[in-house]
Image: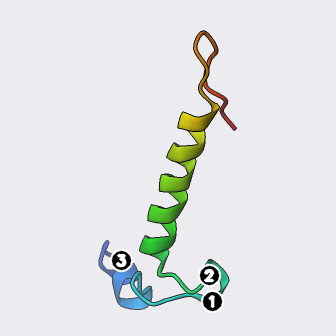
Amino acid sequence: MGNGVIDGFYNSRRIQKRLGYLSPVEFEEKHYAERATAERTNLKPGQPALTT
């Protein structure tokens, strides 16, 4: 099977109820944007960033 097989089966643009009615791409973008904002908020001078 080639790399294109999953593209024919999996629609990365279709909204998903379990992802809050976002597409998988939109959900990932939102997740990483929120994570970056949280990391900036948790930074204090002289202390390392909090990681999970």
Quadrant in the picture for residue 43: top right
Q: Please report contact status of discs 2 and 1: CB closer than 8 Å, yes or no.
A: no
Alpha carbon separation for disc pair 3 and 1:
29 Å
Q: Dot 1, how many residues are within 10 Å of its Cα: few (below 14), some (14-19), or many (20+)? A: few
Q: What quarter of the picture does the C terminus occupy? A: top right
Give me the disc on residue 20.
2
Q: Secondary structure at mark 1?
A: helix
Q: Position of residue 13 (x, y in %)?
A: 39, 85
Alpha carbon separation for disc pair 2 and 3:
32 Å
Against 37, residue 18 (above or below) is: below
Circle nearer the N terminus (3, 1): 3
Residue at 54 percent across and 60 percent down: it is 31
Q: Dot 3, how many residues are within 10 Å of its Cα: few (below 14), some (14-19), or many (20+)? A: few
Give me the disc on residue 17.
1
Left or right: 40, with 51 as reference point? left
Q: Amino acid at mark 2?
A: Gly
Give me the disc on residue 1.
3
Q: Camera-side residue: 7 or 25?
A: 25
Residue at 62 percent across and 81 percent down: it is 20
Q: Position of residue 16 (x, y in %)?
A: 56, 87
